[in-house]
Image (spheres, rainbow, N blue to C red):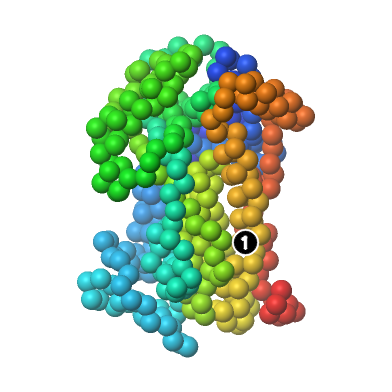
Amino acid sequence: YDQIRHLGFEYEYIEFYSDDGWRLGGVANGDRQAYGYPALRIYRAAILEALLKCINDYSTLITIRWGSSVNKIAESDTGVEVTLHDGSTVNGDILVGADGIHSKIREYVLGDRAPTPIYGGQYGIGGCVERNEIDWQNFTLPALLFSHRGAVLLFPFTPDGNNIGWAIQSTVPEKTREGWIEYLNSGAALEDVRKQYADAGQPVQDILAKTKVETMRGWPPYKIPDIPTWHTNRVLLIGDAAHCIPPYSGQGAAQAFEDAGYLARLLADQTTLTFGYPTIFAHFEKVRKERFAHVRELTEQSGNMRHTSSKWQWFIKKYLMWFYFYQYERGYLRDGRIFEYDINKEPLLSTDQSTTD
């Protein structure tokens, strides 16, 4: 955290407003007093660079093979052999499948039971503007601006807070990979958003008018149903390969990091290793599924708040949201189950546990 905090924007709260400027409440994403740290909004590329630097520091232990993809997996009682598409093979005691929503390793683990990812229908679209280009009126950032059209997320990215990112969800038919790229680069995505928010107030109108096409980004969300198992005896799925949620709560990558951190603890513990990989993987799956169930519940609640509605529905929804948030101190929801979670407090396996724990 100390290596990347200077690369992003530190904050503690996200403010929730109606589009007429009425503050509805907010969410404590980071709280120095309650959680011991602030939240950090940062470009994903900055995190990837930091992770790659850490990997380079352990180059004698970790090898990266860029452009590789899995063609075949052969599992035995003593290890796993993976054949890559270039014909080369790699061997190890176990295989961890962190290959995302379109996971090939999940197909191996589940066989005919492997689900096909389904497009969620609500395409995430975003862009960037400079803070000094916009009249922010009385809005405090970061913020979510709600209306009957949905919600606009506004977030500073850079440490000085001058680069402001925005994002919305919009109903867009599914496209091919190339089709999504063309949709963004042609300016069609930005034009559709401008039409969707044509009757929006300020600062949304200014933001969309001053957004340049080259800053646009898109996130077509795919989902899978709960899968019956995350593992075989020597192959384990983590991250989106095992569980996938829409981006409404910003917890997708976070859950992958939690998975990796907890798995590392289990594999580094000598007592836990004596139980064998099948038992370790079953324990990992049980613990992480319980955690993921709550995160998914939060994500669904966040997504429901952002859905489009009629103006009359929005009128009612606005007051219900205000009433909900003002049950909490200063109108801020604090969900300790999300932000106080600590993988170091999750249980390891010990000799006095049964294998069914």
- Residue, far bottom: 77
Please tell me which residue is depicted at 51% across the width and 37% down the height of the picture: 40
Please tell me which residue is depicted at 36% across the width and 53% down the height of the picture: 53
On the question of residue 131 being in view, the answer is: no
Please tell me which residue is depicted at 38% across the width and 49% down the height of the picture: 48
Residue 172 horizontal side relative to residue 232, left or right: left
Secondary structure found at label 1: helix
Q: Position of residue 1 (x, y in %)?
A: 51, 46
Depicted 2 relative to depicted 141: above or below = below
User: Depth check: 317 or 330 in front?
Assistant: 317
On the question of residue 354 being in view, the answer is: yes
Please tell me which residue is depicted at 30% across the width and 35% down the height of the picture: 184
Depicted 48 relative to depicted 231: above or below = above
Q: Quadrant of residue 97?
A: bottom left
Three-letter code, disc 1: Lys
User: Depth check: 216 or 306 in front?
Assistant: 306
Identify the image quadrant of the C terminus: bottom right
Depicted 225 relative to depicted 8: above or below = below
Q: Position of residue 327 (x, y in %)?
A: 77, 29
Residue located beneath label 1 in the image? 289
User: Depth check: 305 or 37 in front?
Assistant: 305
Q: Position of residue 117 (x, y in %)?
A: 43, 57
